[in-house]
Image (cartoon, helix red, strand yellow):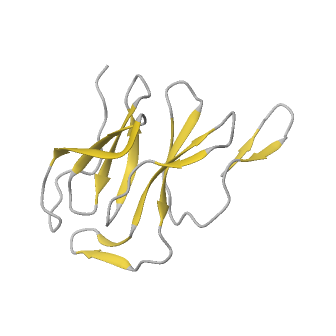
Amino acid sequence: IQLLDFRTLAQTTLFEGELGLSEFNWSPDGRMIAFYRKDPSKSYIDIPSVGQLWHGNIWVVSVPSGEVRQITFIKGTAFRPTWSPDGRTLSFLTHDGSIGLTSLEQPGILWKAATTSADMPLFTSMFFMP
């Protein structure tokens, strides 16, 4: 993950490594970026209606410090991170068609917000209402 300052054209590397096809999402205050990071040691998960997904989890990188933290620790796939308006909670989709929630203060602790079927997931995205 690299940032480019358009005024100075200076580049800052925030994260190096294999991400796969990641989706990045800036926190509301612009101080963090949430992203999906694939686990290169695991194989694909086959989902009939979606195709193949890598095993992977949600990570967060601090823009000021460059500190990188894993936020979800599921056995499967957590992807499409979305920030709450206060920047303290992330929602995400899972390989089994569910929506999960996690707090930055308690990484790894998950709340299942909604569930559907992995064969026919009803959820493709999510958002928070202010």
Q: Is residue 50 left or right of residue 88?
A: left
Q: Is residue 105 left or right of residue 34?
A: left
Name the residue located 55 percent from the left edge and 63 percent from the top edge: 19
Question: What residue occupies the far top of the structure in this picture?
Answer: 130
Query: At which x and y percent is residue 126?
Result: 29, 40
Which residue corresponds to the image point at 56% horizontal and 36% vertical from the top-left? 32
Q: Position of residue 130 (x, y in %)?
A: 32, 19
**The one of 30 and 104 positioned closer to us in this rendering:** 104
In the rendering, at what x and y percent does residue 1 appear?
65, 52
Placement of 73 over or under 128, stated as above or below:
below
Q: Is residue 116 above or below residue 120?
A: above
- The quarter of the displayed image where residue 8 is located: top right
Left or right: residue 53 compared with residue 69: left
Query: In percent of the image, x 37 and y 57: which residue is there?
Result: 73
Number of numbered labels in the structure image: 0
Q: Residue at x 50, y 63 (%)?
A: 21
Percent x, y of residue 27: 50, 32
